Image: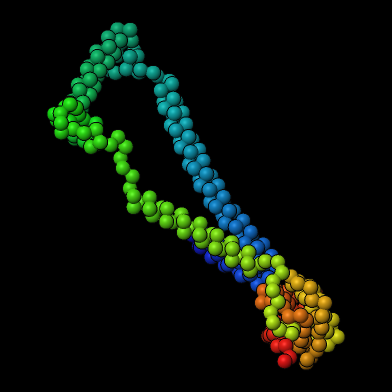
Amino acid sequence: MKYVSYLFGGLSTIAAAVYLVIYLYRWEWQRAVICGVLLLAVEGFLVCVLLLGRMGRLERRIADADTRVEEVKRRLEHSREQSAGHPFRWLGADGGGGGGVDGGGRTYVFVPILMVTGAALSGIAWVIQRIAAVTVRPGAERRLAGRLAPLAAPAGGIRSGSFQAGDRPAVPPARPLRVLLAGVGSAAAVALLVFGVSTLADATETREEARPDAAATTVVFEVEVHGTSSDTARELAARDLWEQCRRATSTENPGAGLSRLTPGVYAGVIRPALSDHDVMRLRGCLSDAVANRATAKVLGDGQAARPH
């Protein structure tokens, strides 16, 4: 379930980011804002899933640790209860057989047992140490000698003619292929970033551009108002959209008229003609439908040629 959540969140994040850039490129600001909010929501979801997973693992570890602590505590309490009544029972007057002998006379058994146990443990430790020395020392010394070989003096000594100080560099040489690949990758990443920023800046620029050699720009769009089919409501929505969107271009267009072609279909004419970038901004604004309950669909656009 965790990996499914990560997969869903990752795909949603990629889709929201891609459409955010697309809507910014098309100058469809309302949709871009929605995609940006969705992107933030998905990122918050992924962060919450990650934090909940980490918190769940911490809770399980704390629970396991508490369980182990309680188990050890129960064992200690149980052992204390067993040994609390008769510590060293075999030293008591009634322990270990041979009743009738006082406890003070039986303490002589304790010291020899400790001495024999200590001698036995020392012997076992010596045997283990000898076995480890015989089996481990050759391999360990061979690996250590291999590591220290670059630091050893040459066979003929430092003053021999066969030794040169530059034969053994103090610092291992760098790997040129790895450095080259890292440099190429970094340069490609920087170039890709600059290209993306430049492309997005050009797509969302607001500076005035040169107008084309045309008499006017014509945009035909269709308007629908949700909840009503009244021609009056559609015409009011169309004019509202047109007045808002014609001012969204980077150049002034005082001569911008709107005429009705068929019910719900309108044609806007702007004089003088708009540049290609301004036409894209106008189409994006109309498609974004910022009017109340109104949606617009751009059917086409074009440049009207000058009369000869």
Between 124 and 103, the one lying in front of the other is 124
Between 18 and 63, the one lying in front of the other is 18
Q: Position of residue 113 (x, y in %)?
A: 25, 16
Between 21 and 90, the one lying in front of the other is 21
Q: Is residue 184 above or below residue 271?
A: above
Q: Is residue 141 left or right of residue 235?
A: left
Q: Is residue 234 above or below residue 73?
A: below
Residue 12 can be seen, yes or no: no
Q: Position of residue 35 (x, y in %)?
A: 65, 66
Between 218 and 150, the one lying in front of the other is 218
Q: Is residue 8 above or below residue 159?
A: below
Q: Is residue 116 left or right of residue 71?
A: left
**Colour scheme of the rendered structure:** rainbow
Q: Is residue 238 left or right of residue 96?
A: right
Q: Position of residue 104 (x, y in %)?
A: 33, 7
Check the picture and name the quadrant holding the C terminus. Answer: bottom right
Q: Residue at x 67, y 74 (%)?
A: 277
Q: Residue at x 63, y 59 (%)?
A: 40
